[in-house]
Image (cartoon, rainbow, N blue to C red):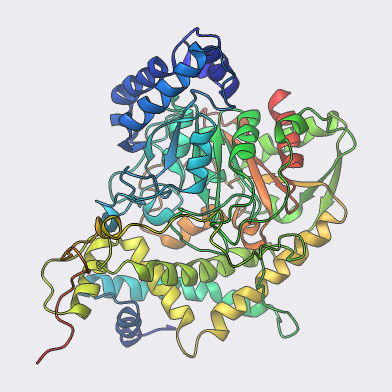
Amino acid sequence: MDPQALTIDATRAAVQERRTKATALAEDFYQRIEKQDPLIGAYLTLSKDRALAKAAEIDALAVKGERLPPLGGVPVAIKDVMATCGVRTTAGSKILGNYIPPYDCTAVARMEAAGAVVLGKLNCDEFAMGSSNENSAWRPVRNPRDMSRVPGGSSGGSAAAVSANLAVTTLGSDTGGSIRQPASFCGVVGLMPTYGRVSRYGLIAFASSLDRIGPLAKTVKDAALVLRTIAGRDPMDSTSANVPVPDYVAELEKPVRGLKLGVPQEYFGEGLDDEVRKAVEAAIQKLSKLGCEIVPISLPHTEYAIPAYYIVATAEASSNLARFDGVRYGFRASDAGNLSEMYRRSRDQGFGAEVKRRIMLGTYALSAGYYDAYYLKAQKVRTLLAQDFAAAFNNVDVIVTPTSPTAAFKLGEKVDDPLAMYLADIFTVTANLTGICGISVPCGETKGKLPIGLQILGKHFGEAMILRVGNAVEQN
Amino acid sequence: MKISEKDVVYVADLAHLELTEEERARFLRDLNSILEYVDRLNELDTSQVQPMSQMTDPGKTTTLREDILEGLRKQLPHDVALVNAPDSDGTFFRVPKVIER
């Protein structure tokens, strides 16, 4: 079977109609991983026993002629920041190098309950901190579309695995662009749901007011199918919202005619690569031809998003990562004489450079005398950004922008300049800071054949609308 | 320079990090350059702005529940909770000496 043709529906139908077995399909994927992944580096851990047991369960249903669940037999993989019971979960960090979670992340459990076959865990920047996947403590991931380039980050393994057909669909997490930017770099679809849409129980926390879990997929419809599976209230996560989950797949087919598309001038200024601009403008033109009304808008506080983001994200990270102390789980330095030394040395040896840099910045921003100047200031700027979006969404249905100012950059290009790396997220952090949803959909290529992504931003719980517009871009 | 070498040592101590000489020099440089960039937030007058404290409309997303265990995960059995411990005596987590005497 041609792996590129394997969407969720096509895979499930093949297993349902017994043209293939879920177990055979999983073995196929493992063979492809064995052959291709040494070069790409998308996978950190394979969960063969678990995958084959689930696949056998699905095969048994198919043999009995029972109707398979929506993801029945579909090979998927999970970013290594989500806990998987009995399967090593490292968050891309040495400090969790031997960590075997005793429970499942809700999103993973819901995928499996819907019949998905979890092949393994995917590489990412350490604790999801990075925009290139070069901060993984284990190895960088390469972009399957051009092996000399980064896949984006931090869900680089999740994007690369879909792009290289090493999984049908994957889960990633997005704190400042970590699903959408790698999706754009690898030429796949990446959806970041609204804050509260998907439970984060079992997600290793980076920045709790920003973190989301969402799908990376080959098609917008697949992303809709996965979202429908993982969305909805979870009693184990008090930040998961009591908002009904619509049938995102049925909503896809609705026409886009008459929708108002906001185009914010601030996302098309200096620093935007020419080829990216052309591809995004062409996609907007296409939507206009389909009957969408194009409305120029302004989001005036956009330039303050990155500085606000790096205060909020690092402050929250410094608190969240305080739990890694070498006592209850994770790495412990062996050479410490007393408790305090044990904490410091375990953290020193267990965390990588970027993680320490962010813990330092966040601790400084929260320390006595600086809280008002940095954290409180940044939280106020967030309110201004939220007001920008609220005003815009009074007049438009969705907002369209480039996902990233450039296509995928070269490995090593930005590793020595943290600020340059942070600026790779310039068009994506605003949605994290304001709680809204966003999707990146492929909208063309550079002359060098590098994928370009169109970002569609929607209102709180407006996933159905951005999926619909994304589907229109994909289908035309 | 917004922060000095002394600040770096102080903040590292707050964060329970030790840091090598090299890392201290590197972070001194990086943090100053990032903080300088962050300073542009001061171009904005936020004296009349409320800090964001709620990510979604609380009216729409209220998540209060009865104080009962229904729908929640069962607590981890004692032995399972200790499985990932770097050191344990089977009942407790074991750590190096806390008090010198």
Q: Is residue A402 left or right of residue A158?
A: right
Q: Is residue A217 left or right of residue A314?
A: right
Q: Is residue A136 left or right of residue B49?
A: left
Placement of the N terminus of chain B among the 4 image quadrants: bottom left
Q: Quadrant of residue A123?
A: top left
Placement of the C terminus of chain B among the 4 image quadrants: bottom left
**In the depicted view, which residue is nearer to us: A130 or A409?**
A130
Q: Position of residue A183 (x, y in %)?
A: 54, 38
Q: Going 46% across and 61% down the picture, which residue do you hit?
A: A206
Q: Going 20% across and 71% down the picture, which residue do you hit?
A: A345
Q: Going 70% across and 65% down the picture, which residue do you hit?
A: A385
Q: Position of residue A399 (x, y in %)?
A: 76, 48
Against A276, residue B73 (above or below) is: below
Residue A431 appears in view: yes
**In the depicted view, which residue is nearer to us: A385 or B100?**
B100
Q: Quadrant of residue A475?
A: top right
Total residue callouts: 0
Q: Position of residue A455 (x, y in %)?
A: 66, 43
Residue A150 appears in view: no
Against A174, residue A454 (above or below) is: above
Of all residues, the one furthest to the right in this rendering is A258
Q: Position of residue A336 (x, y in %)?
A: 13, 74
**In the depicted view, which residue is nearer to us: A69 or B60?**
A69
